[in-house]
Amino acid sequence: MVLFAILLLVFVSCYRYKRYYTVVTYLFSFVLISMLFTLSVSVGALSNVFLNPGNLFYAFVMIAEPMTSPVNKKRQILYGFAVALVYAILICIIQGYIRHLSFLDSSLLALLIGNLLFF
């Protein structure tokens, strides 16, 4: 049932809204950046990005939202990469250095920063 819901999200955001460049760039960039930051290549990191329903919802709905994401193909690629980079940096900063700010949602903050940069 969850797989059906995710496939429905893929259809709407990638096919109907034509935001597949943003989604694919975000997913692969986030995997590569998180592997660079942790200096490890593991199946757990891949499965956390590609099989986690929360992360897939974030990629297919939040990032690909048509009102705030770019329409141009090149800007979609840059937007997906920028959100993935900011998200990974915020995770490292909040988890590693500023533990008293753990109430901040780094994914929404990364999305906000990406929207400000590419709006």
Image: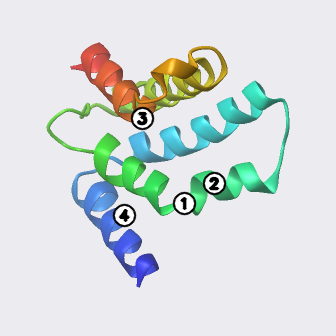
Indicate which disc, 2 or 4, sits on the residue closer to the N terminus. Answer: 4
Tell me what residue is drawn at x 59 percent, y 51 percent.
49
Q: Position of residue 10 (x, y in %)?
A: 36, 63
Residue lying at the far front in this picture: please name it.
100
Q: Which residue is mark 2?
A: 48
Q: Position of residue 3 (x, y in %)?
A: 45, 78
Of labels 2 and 4, the one closer to you: 2
Quarter of the image where the C terminus is located:
top left
Q: Which residue is mark 3?
A: 107
Q: In the rendered structure, are the residues bearing label 2 and label 1 in contact, judged by CB atoms less than 8 Å apart?
A: yes
Tell me what residue is drawn at x 67 percent, y 59 percent.
47
Q: Amino acid at mark 4?
A: Val
Tell me what residue is drawn at x 79 percent, y 56 percent.
43
Residue lying at the far left in this picture: please name it.
67
Label 4: element kind: helix
Q: In the rendered structure, are the residues bearing label 3 and label 4 in contact, judged by CB atoms less than 8 Å apart?
A: no
Q: How is the image coloured?
A: rainbow
Query: How far apart are the alpha carbons under marks 3 and 4?
Result: 19 Å
Query: How far apart are the alpha carbons under marks 1 and 3?
Result: 14 Å
Q: Which residue is mark 4?
A: 10
Q: In the rendered structure, are the residues bearing label 3 and label 2 in contact, judged by CB atoms less than 8 Å apart?
A: no
Q: Position of residue 111 (x, y in %)?
A: 34, 30
Residue 111's tag is none
Horizontally, residue 19 falls left or right of residue 119, namely right
Label 2: element kind: helix
Indicate which disc, 1 or 4, sits on the residue closer to the N terminus. Answer: 4
